[in-house]
Amino acid sequence: MFFHIVLERKIQLHPRYFGPHLRDKLVAKLMKEVEGTCSGRHGFVVAITGVEDIGKGLIREGTGFVTFPVKYQCVVFRPFKGEILEAVVTMVNKMGFFAEAGPVQIFVSNHLIPDDMEYQAGDMPNYTTSDGSVKIQKDCEVRLKIMGTRVDATEIFCIGTIKDDFLGVISDPSAAS
């Protein structure tokens, strides 16, 4: 799920950037350091939408660097248990398959795949229904439900299922060709 929240961070700036464009340099450095990162508490920072406040800088003795406290608004992505997501399958093996929904990697175990689907090994491993009408393979899109999440300091891991109503393959690239 996406949230729009306010966060705070301390940004260090070299003295050569002091001048009329100090604010622009601080915002550029903030974006470079923060966008695309993950904090276990808030989730993945997708984008910075605005800077609310830049506090007074504190000079670091001996180096000349200045540390500025910056308060900013950002959009974060954090998956929750029970949430329904659309994801792209990245790898299929006999244990299940991995899919990605934005920056989050989700594992779907073969126990959480419908019973009528069987693993097919080969040059393009996949899970196929007995009648061959539905196929889960690399690069196909699936709708899945998050069963659980594990949060580390810099990453979020998820376990998902497609063993429920209205879940499963939503687009198959091999069917189009």
Image: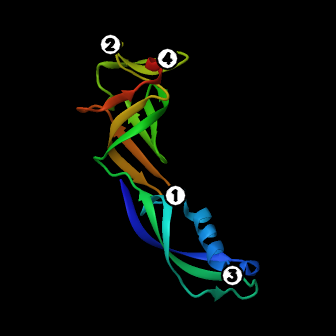
How far apart are the two marked residues, 2 and 3, measured between alpha carbons?
Answer: 68 Å
As measured in the structure, the alpha-carbon distance from the residue carrying label 1 to the one carrying label 2 is 41 Å
Farthest residue in the top direction?
131
Question: Do labels 2 and 3 touch, CB within 8 Å?
Answer: no
**Residue drawn at 45 percent across, 35 percent down:** 88
The reply to whether dot 1 and dot 2 touch (C-beta < 8 Å) is no
Q: Distance between the residues labelled 4 and 3?
A: 56 Å
Residue at 44 percent of width and 31 percent of height: 97
Residue at image position (29%, 25%) is: 114
- In the displayed structure, would residue 76 be above or below residue 27? above
Q: Which of marks 1 and 2 is nearer the N terminus?
A: 2
Q: Which mark, residue 20?
A: 3
Label 4 crowd (10 A; few <14 / some 14-19 / many >=20): few
Q: Quadrant of residue 68?
A: bottom right
Cα–Cα gap, marks 1 and 3? 35 Å
Q: Residue 177 carries which label?
A: 4
